[in-house]
């Protein structure tokens, strides 16, 4: 009888452990950069998670994001500047597509008006 209880207890613990892992559904963040050639790397940062990926042909994806609110940082090649986008909400088990982001050239930051 004691052996049956131990076996049953082990089965119960294993079942709870498996169900715990099944409740955590992976989420993702994806998007595009234009002009495509000038996007290099991307980071997604939240209070509990920091993700990194390369940008390929203007596209990026973070396939295993934890639910939360992220700041996206895009590293760009010159003559374009790095950019950031805040407030990206990621929900459990869902793909968050932030759409297309357009990089800005450095010259637009330092443009001066003529008098």
Image (cartoon, rainbow, N blue to C red):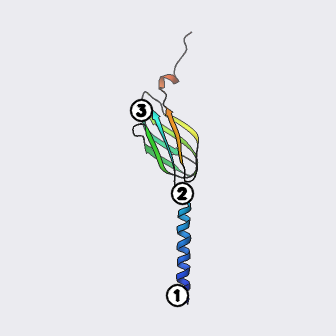
User: Which residue is identified by label 2?
Assistant: 25
Quadrant location of the C terminus in the rendered image: top right
Q: Nearer the viewer, residue 36 or 45?
A: 36
Q: Earlier in the sequence, mark 2 or mark 3?
A: 2
Q: Earlier in the sequence, mark 3 or mark 1?
A: 1
Q: CA distance from mark 3 to mark 1?
A: 65 Å
> Residue 30, position in %: x, y?
49, 43
Closer to us: mark 1 or mark 2? Answer: 2
Disc 3, disc 1: CB below 8 Å?
no
Residue at horizontal 52 percent and vertical 68 percent from the top? 18
Q: CA distance from mark 1 to mark 2?
A: 35 Å
Q: Secondary structure at mark 1?
A: helix
User: Which residue is identified by label 3?
Assistant: 38
Q: Is residue 38 left or right of residue 72?
A: left
Q: CA distance from mark 2 to mark 3?
A: 33 Å
In the rendered view, would you say 55 is above or below 78? below
């Amino acid at each position: 009888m004691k052996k049956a209880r131990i076996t049953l207890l082990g089965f119960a613990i294993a079942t709870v452990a498996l169900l715990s892992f099944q409740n955590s559904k992976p989420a993702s963040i994806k998007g595009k950069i234009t002009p495509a050639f000038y996007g290099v790397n991307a980071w997604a940062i939240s209070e509990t998670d920091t993700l990194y990926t390369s940008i390929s042909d203007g596209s990026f994806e973070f396939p295993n994001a934890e639910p939360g609110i992220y700041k996206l940082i895009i590293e760009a090649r010159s003559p374009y500047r790095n950019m950031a986008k805040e407030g990206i909400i990621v929900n459990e088990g869902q793909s968050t597509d932030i759409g297309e982001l357009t990089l800005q050239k450095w010259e637009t930051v330092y443009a001066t008006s003529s008098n």
